[in-house]
Amino acid sequence: MGSTANKLTSPDSTGSARLSWRSAQSPSASRLTAPLRGLSAAEACRRLAEEGSNSLPVVKRPGVAGLVLEVLREPMFVLLCAASGIYLVIGDVTEALILAASIAVVIAITVGQKVKTERALEALRDLSSPRALVIRDGVQTRIAGAEVVRGDVLILSEGDRVAADGNLLVANDLAVDESLLTGESLPAEKHLPAEGAPERAGAVYSGTLVVKGHGYAEVVATGPRTELGCIGRALEEIAPEKTTLERETARIVKLVAAFAVGLSALVALIHLVLRDGWVESVLAGLTLAMAILPEEFPVVLTVFLALGAWRIARRGVLTRRMPAIEMLGAATVLCVDKTGTLTENRMAVKQVLADGEWVDLASSEKLSRSAREVLAHAALASELAPFDPMESAILAAASRDAPESSEWRSAWLLDRDYSLSETFLAVCHAWRDAEGKAVVAVKGAPETVVALCGIDAAGAGALLEQAGRAAGRGMRVLGVARAEWGGQSWPEDPRSFRFRWLGFVALADPLRSSVPPAVAECRRAGIRVVMITGDHAGTALAIAREAGIGTEGGALTGAELEGLRDTELAGAVRRVDVFARVLPDQKLRLVTALKAAGEIVAMTGDGVNDAPALRAAHIGVAMGSRGTDVAREAASLVLLRDEFGAIVDTVRLGRRIYDNVRNAMGYLLSVHVPIAGMAFLPLVMGGPVMLYPVHVVFLEFVIDPACSVVFEAEAGEREAMRRPPRGPRDPLFSGAMLAVSLALGATSLLAVALLYGWAFSVGRTDAEVRSLGFAAIVLGNLAMIFANRSRSRSILATLVRPNPMLWWMTAGTIAALALTLYLPSVAAVFRFAPLGAGDLGLALAAGIAGILWIECWKLSRRRG
């Protein structure tokens, strides 16, 4: 197949990829004589079932047996097994069996949590897999990269990650970064081989990155059969590293465990000296160790972040990096693009300027010859198969009001394409008609196109003033010009053409209805919304005013930004909220300047050149539907729906997750104090031992669901988006949080200890004292859960906030407590005696008394 140039018509109204190709001398294309239809959906499904998904080998994760072994290595379960073994040694088979059964139940719950977490993470991995644009049944379809099969036709565009190995069918100025496979830093130019046999220059490989141009490739290998898959197989045995959070919490647990072991050994020794009996002494030590050990900390952080990311994904936002969830609560600035994020991304040509007059397309039945010429040449200066909504809108308007443009695009050959660049803000296409006559069309930024036409200063000023007025009405204005060329070869610089001015096309993209309330919500939350757009300053300011974004500081353009020193820019970003005519590489300067000004920056982007700015921002947010794979890989979050409201939803959810993590941690710090205290104080007070391992296991059945299910399911505070962002350096375990949590635990311990001491002093039996104290701990535990649901709202105020898991757990705990007190066989194991209604009232009063002060404190703070 010889080298040919291509001519591609845009997709028809049904979205079918109707392609035709014409022969010409050009370094990069193929001859296709029929429309590309690709595989049928049925055939693709059959091949997917036969050959497997297009996925690389993944690290083998432990099954249920492996998870059980992981759980058994945790310190808490080591202690439980030791206690069970001691009961077997002394011949208390019943107690040993109960502890063994408890171990099995706790293992089941813990493994269930891990499986749930892993499934949530697996769902996120599926969402985060590369996407691929393929042709199926003649229709362009975007699918998950894992669903690509052999024989699919891939559509490759700049910024895409190649989903599978394939041979090129079409290559238009195509270059691919293959450093992942070859180590070569320079992109590899791709073109069709001169001969029929495939060669590397005519092939693309899974995992490589398209850095320039466009192309079509037929897939020849997927998954482990690709070149990247061969490398991936060598990675199967590499164990995944723990996150920083996991390592930090594991370190905390180990430190506390070491402290618990030392203190437990001391308690066992004291027990042995004061009361004699080595078995009872060892059990007392084990019980204290189990009571102190905060093994729930890693569970809380892992489960909350994983399920939080899953919840955010359900709202259309994919979390690629877990720390981004923590940072969301601290974001002070949201930098957003205008088109597609604030607006609906459905551009339409509203007006055309021709012969000095604006013509409204909606009210004109037939356009003048000059107006049709403007539209037709704007269409000629558009991509062959455009993805840009403005170009799609121009083609739609031209095909309706200037039908000759469709005939030209169908019959003429696109012979040279001058792409938009940082120094040339326009698109220029050079065509040859059927007789070989050369026609050049250009469209782009008004100042760029006007400058190309050699218009005198007065005329250029008048035209740009008209463009500015249209932009001030919220229009996106593009200049259009035409040139003819009689040379044998095309010039390298489009400025070499002698262009004739034709006019303007003005497009509008309506603001999303959800944007103004979302911007207002950000303002209430103390978050600035900053617009960064490539549009004209007037257009940007008009949309900003409509959206509610601050325009008091005017608009700073990319050209003005370029002339500012870094210190000057750092000052400018404090007062300006609208940046217009900004080039992608200037976004990095803006992000850096905002960070230098002390802001915590979340930024959106979609292009290859946005990747550095996305990476530099504290929270990079990539556009999912129109964003490139490079942008998605550089970002922390990916919007599956490209709209501003989704970002605000994410901030709200991020604040909710952070609040719930803090509340759960506060509860955990509080709840271990009375448990550990009542495992130790009876020894000092000379009363009966109150807690044995079986009692601690019972309490773990309350603590584990509370911290990993109940608090995670808590709805966000109504005030979450009415308070300023938290400080980025605020620690999760702040001094105030530690003080309040430990004080809450201490008062609960005091209330239980006073009740225990009273019961012992009035001559209650050991079983009654133990029952009364344990009931007070359990009911106090429930009271602490209710108190920790909110750091600012009282229990009565939070009762109106639904949380079904809370009520299920409360009912289950009370029912289990009743069984231990009133079912004789169970009460015997717990060494309990039944309690009367009055005793239960005392236990409830002690539980409530322990948290009463913090409720009064919340009310006083709200009134203050």
Image (spheres, helix red, strand yellow):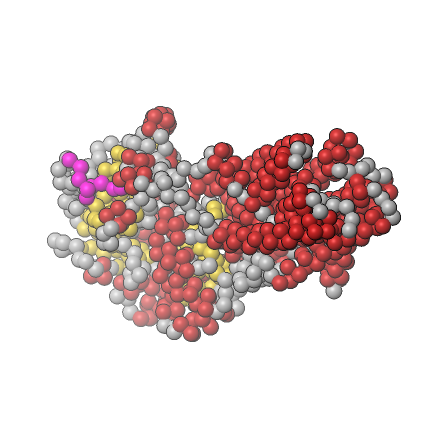
Q: Quadrant of residue 662?
A: bottom right
The answer to which of 745 and 594 lies nearer the viewer is 745
Q: Is residue 76 magenta?
A: no
Q: Is residue 198 magenta?
A: yes
Residue 241 x, y percent position in the rendering: 43, 48
Residue 93 x, y percent position in the rendering: 66, 31
The answer to which of 421 and 479 lies nearer the viewer is 421
Q: Which residues are magenta?
A: 197-205
What residue lies at 45% left-to-right and 52% top-to-bottom? 636
The answer to which of 279 and 786 lies nearer the viewer is 279
Residue 669 as seen in the image, left or right of residue 688: left
Residue 268 as seen in the image, left or right of residue 624: right
Residue 423 as seen in the image, left or right of residue 282: left
- Does residue 637 appear in this view? no
Residue 81 x, y percent position in the rendering: 59, 39
What residue lies at 12% left-to-right and 53% top-to-bottom? 488
